[in-house]
Image (tube, grey):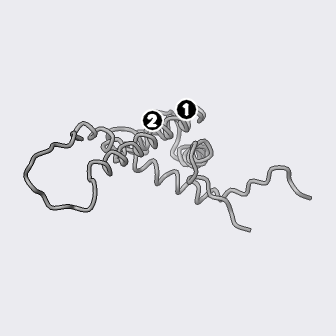
Amino acid sequence: MSKLFDFDIDEDKSRQQADKLLTQYWRLKHVVISTSSLRSPSYSHTPKSFSGGNATEKRAIKTLEARQTLEYIDVALSKLTAINRELLKLQYLSAGKLTVSYICDELGITASAFRKHKKQALLEFAESYPSDGLLIFKEH
């Protein structure tokens, strides 16, 4: 008997992808913040050697990609249940590295509930992320 919607999601790999992306949150944030160091090209009549690429253009593209990824993260987080959203924000988006016990105290949950919610939150995040790459499907 076939199912109408047979989504055979590899939950463990999808969670790993979500964790990998969220772990890079602050690196992405720094790329976007450092945009202020992008300057307009300056011209002079002094001959220069050709470098074979445009570093300013590459940096601008990286900045745009980072900004888009941060927007996607915000969209995905906005779709999560309140406790899962807060858990992921505390775990990955906090300025300092917070301990599990601190996060548990903040959320009013036990360590075992934390692990359960984190597994659920990462999968929920992967499913809510508006771009490809986080949800991994099992091969048949």
Q: Residue at x 33, y 45 (%)?
A: 60
Q: Is 1 above or below relative to 62?
A: below
Contact? badges 2 and 1 (CB < 8 Å): no
How many numbered marks are there?
2
* Residue 87 x/y as whole percent: 50, 39
Local secondary structure at mark 1: helix
Q: Residue at x 46, y 51 (%)?
A: 21
Q: Please name whichever residue, 136 or 32, is drawn nearer the observer in this view of the structure.
A: 32
Q: Is 38 above or below relative to 18?
A: above
Question: Would you name the residue on which mark 1 appears?
Answer: 78
Q: Quadrant of the N terminus?
A: bottom right
Q: Quadrant of the C terminus?
A: bottom right
- Amino acid type at image mark 2: Asp
Binning the other alpha carbons within 10 Å of mark 1 as few (below 14), some (14 to 19) or many (20 upward) gives few
Marks 2 and 1, the one that precedes in the sequence: 1
Left or right for 53, reference 15: left
- Amino acid type at image mark 1: Ser
Q: Residue at x 45, y 35 (%)?
A: 105
Left or right for 63, reference 39: right
Q: Residue at x 49, y 52 (%)?
A: 19
Q: Please name whichever residue, 97 or 133, is drawn nearer the observer in this view of the structure.
A: 133
Residue ranking furthest to the bottom: 140
* Residue 16 x/y as whole percent: 53, 57
Real-space CA distance between mark 2 and mark 1, rounded to the nearest whole angstrom: 22 Å
* Residue 137 x/y as whole percent: 67, 59
* Residue 48 x/y as whole percent: 12, 57
Q: Nearer the viewer, mark 2 or mark 1?
A: 1
Q: Please name whichever residue, 26 or 82, is drawn nearer the observer in this view of the structure.
A: 26
Question: Would you name the residue on which mark 2 appears?
Answer: 105
Q: Which mark is residue 63?
A: none
Left or right for 130, reference 55: right
